[in-house]
Image (cartoon, rainbow, N blue to C red):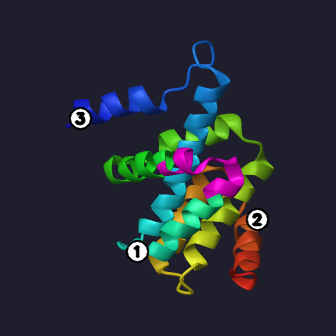
Amino acid sequence: MLNKLKEFFQNELTFNAAKSTDAEQKYSLEQACALLLMEVSGADFEQSKLEKDKIKQLLQALFELSDEKLDELFERSNQASKDTTSMHPFTSMINDNYEYDQKVNLLSLMWKVAFVDDNLDKYEEAMIRKIADLLYISHRDYIKVKHIAEEKRE
């Protein structure tokens, strides 16, 4: 089991700028973002079709993906979300490659996923708080983005 997880992280998550192409880096960042959105939607131990559809919509808008690429990203990230025990590798990748404003934008997407079913579960909120801390987002911005998402529920 540990070898399988180790192999997964080595194959899927390690980013070596000297060996990686821009496309590989982009895909890894896309997968990290997708996985974090899925972690939020699954935090309450159920992932509704409404949440899945919202994640797909947000990923397609954020990364301008074809339907085929979106489905592939979604499936790989969904499986990775089931297999992962830590968000640290994903948040580290985002911290290494995103500016603060980009991380705040990702946080706003997490809130949109959490509010899509008009029911903010305490576990979803706790997951978003944990991710925000790992992304070094200030509490002020965490609350600000939460209130904006709550007011503008889609």
Residue density around tag 2, few if under 14, some if 14–19, many if 20 or more, within 10 Å:
some
The quadrant the N terminus occupies is top left
Between circles 3 and 2, the one closer to the viewer is 3
Tag 2–tag 1 contact (CB < 8 Å): no
Quick one: quadrant of the C terminus? bottom right
x, y (%) of residue 105? 74, 58
Please, is residue 136 above or below residue 50 in the view?
above
Instruction: Judge the density around disc 3: few (<14), some (14-19), many (≥20) Cα neighbours within 10 Å.
Output: few
Left or right, 117 with respect to 49, comes to right
- 143, 84: nearer the viewer: 84
Residue corresponding to mark 2: 141
Report the Cα–Cα distance between label 2 and label 1.
23 Å
Label 1 crowd (10 A; few <14 / some 14-19 / many >=20): some
Q: Nearer the viewer, residue 59 or 20?
A: 59
Identify the image quadrant of residue 30: top right
In the picture of the structure, the residue carrying the numbered disc 1 is 44
